[in-house]
Amino acid sequence: MKKFALTMLLALVVFSASACTLGVDSDGESITIYSERHYDTDQILFDRFEDQTGITVNVIDGDADPLINRLENEGEDTSADVLLIADAGRLHRAKDKNLLQSVESETLSNNIPSNYRDSDNYWFGLTKRARVLVYHPDRVDESALSTYESLSNPEFEGRVVTRTSANIYNQSLMASFIEIMGQDDAKAWAEGLVNNFARQPAGNDRDQAKYVVEGNADIAIMNTYYIGRMMNSSDTFEQEVADTVEVFFPNQETTGTHVNVSAAGVTRYSPNPEAATQFIEFLSNEESQSSFANANYEYPVNEHVEPHDLLKSWGDFKAQDINLSVLGENSQRAAIIMDEVDWR
Amino acid sequence: MLRALKQRTSVFSVISILAALLIVIPMLNILLEIFTPASAAWIHIRENLLRGYIINTVVLIALVAIFSALVGLFSAVMVTRYEFKGRQLLSWFLILPLALPSYIAAYIYADMVSYTGTVGRLLRSINAPFSIDVMNMGGAVFIFVVTLYPYVYMLTRAALSRQSASFSENARILGASPFRTLFTVIIPLLRPAVVAGTLLVVLETLNDYGVVAYFNVRVFSFAIFDAWFRLGDTVAAIRLSGVLMLLVFVVIFIERIIRGKRRYASNVKTKPLERKPLTGAKRFILPGLLWSLMALGFFIPVMQLIYYATMTYQTTLNLELVYLVVNSLTLAITATLLTVFIALMLANYNRTHQSQLKHGLLKITNLGYAIPGAVIAIAVMVFFIDIDHALYPLYQLFDANAPRLILSSSLIMLTFAFVLRFMAIGYNSIESAYDKIGTTYTEAAYSLNASKWKTLWTVDLPLIKQGLVSAMIIVFIDVFKELPLTLILRPTNYDTLASQVYRYAREEMLQEIAVPSLIMVIISSILIYLLTHSRKKGVPANVRPN
């Protein structure tokens, strides 16, 4: 009993020690990032920022919506300076809730094309990803593919897979369609697409590619960077899957391929907005952008930076010409339509 | 005597009432949101989705409850009633699946049967005309049953090893066949244990988000996150958890009605059940079933993890893991000690007081287990930010430039949330340990003028040590693998093993979860081993192998 009590006591001491040292920053300047991105390569970027500026970077990572909720609850007392999350729709939601502030920065205006940042400069896209069609070349002829819209045609019955409607990338895809074709047509399209599903949606993006190779389906709707990352997987069988499938950029003759961003904004009540702006500027510079591009197969937003060779091999493509804020404006409507057509 | 007890134990009641208030206030805070006007999102959920959520949830918990009750009961009866080779080993091995979080099992099984997985490739190589798909309701039931049945197994085995042989002997004397004795005497007497275990399984299932989100099984925990993330409506999410709590109460209420006025306590102190050797083909088939169960719930997933680890250890096995292990361990130990301490106070309060207040209090403090982790997280965060605002003048006394949010940006917030969430498990284990010893020893100590604390420390604690230790280990393992609270409430730059697993899984880097997952499984397994093997120090009949 005594030994046990002693062990427990020791654990308590260690715990209190770690708890006390936690929130204590060094005397130097620091910023706090609420981040949804937490690839190991992102941490390398954060470290590089620290080295170059002497500003310490503290991170809380987690899912985007709980982070937004935390910002909301903390209000003006938050210690967060930067919100760094994927999906323009969510950033728009944060802006709507008055959690971000407008930033005037010539560097950011130069580095980031205007359609990939908020029109009032509340958030700035840092990396792009295209939502493309991935198909099995033995079973689908490239000439049969044209648009997202065509996927709801009868010829693709039982041949299409994608993730669930709970997935934010599908929700934003739907939101972009509401903008482009109007609510009624978007709903009719979704209805046709759901009828053509090869299976009840489940799993993640990589699973969709596997369904295609397995023969469960012929075409998957998924994000570009997953193909790159599967090619780089620690599992050689996943690499084979990625090598087998082909990528197709839909709507090239029409409205363009759906593109989304991961993006950052300075929080409304940031204790250190200058350093926060400096941090986002740093992420948009050519060095950081090329690191994003090469490590994670995302498209850099900075036009002076080349994408990864794999992405270049797919060629240039035409992206949807919409302001990404509409993804946020339409997100709830998109969710409701997807429920109505029973996209599960 | 009772009155004397009452006065002496006031310290327990003070701590109990304080703890109960601390637990209730955040909940009230959040439940009040239910009375705000319905939003468009909520109307959409109510009109179009709620029915489906309720049906799916009822189907899922009914199937999981039935199968885990059967599996748990079967395995408990086997290891306590029959003698066969490997029985001693199995009697603690069967608890091991608790060390493997359901969400990790789900990732692993989905990957194994997928196109690139071990099983998927095997099926293809033998030209099997089918492939296995686990990403559906059936798959979810499978995952929950093989990872959670140990709750039923543990409680049922404990009850069986306490069951007196006289009941079944009487049945045999009256001419009942062994088969009939099993089904009409032994199993009915186990009902409270099986029900209590199954209830734990059901509550764990209701609380899971990882498995159902990955498999796209649309049950309540899915719905709550969906309302929050996809529809962007936290109030709708809270309303949904209100409905879920109602559902939980209905389940518990139905159980009460079925049980009616029957009581199961038995103080007959006679020789325990004797084990019969298995004969014939049964010698191989029945233990074989148990080993397969073990394989499904533990060995196969762990072997797969080891295989992943060989692929990824070069990038994931690093010094940072030491920091994660220290964080996970210290956090889990602190939360466990606090939870068990408060549970102990509550249990003491319970056995020495008789009042309506008491019953209400205990019910409320046990509520945490029925509320989804994400909702607790929101409630606790709002509560701590309020406290920080109230304490701000105090902070300023120490440091004029003090930040306003101190408690809510510290580990205290997360620890508190764990206590709230897992109080029920701690309390119920301790209460059942107290039930067994009654109050006579305590009363004797009081009548000899021993102080409350001295009595607790020198008389009560040694008597219930076994219950206390098993409470600690179950709470510890639960905190250790907990996800939503950890993710939402942890302070800056703070990570645990579970959050590291989640990070890789989120990025669809399944093979990379292996190293941190294995460390979690190993630590929890060691604890289970210790729990089941400390016989010398007088540890519990209810948990040790027999």
Image (spheres, rainbow, N blue to C red):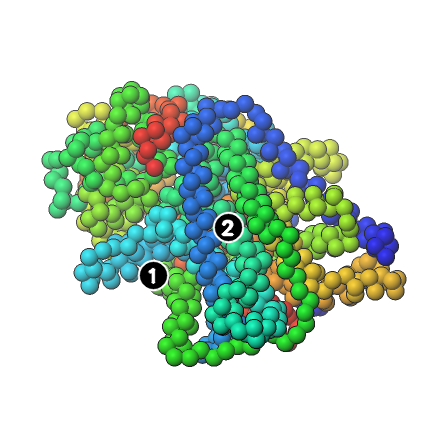
Residue positioned 26% across, 22% down in the render: A185
Q: Give above or below for A301 relative to B487.
A: above
Using the rendered view, name the quadrant where residue A333 is placed: top left
Between B482 and B504, the residue placed more toward the observer is B482
Residues packed near mark 2 inside 10 Å, few (<14), some (14 to 19) or many (20 plus)? many
Q: Which residue is mark 2?
A: B202
Q: Residue at x 68, y 47 (%)?
A: B362
Q: What is the number of the mark on residue B278?
A: none
Q: Position of residue B288 (x, y in %)?
A: 39, 71
CB-based contact (under 8 Å), mark 2 and mark 1:
no
In this view of the protein, which residue sits in the foreground, B171 or B373? B171
Mark 2–mark 1 distance (CA, rounded to whole Å): 36 Å
Q: Is residue A50 above or below residue A187?
A: below
The numbered disc on residue B311 is: 1
Task: Please tell me how crowded label 1 is: few (under 14), some (14-19), or many (20+) other residues with Cα within 10 Å.
Answer: some
Badge 2 marks a residue whose secondary structure is: helix
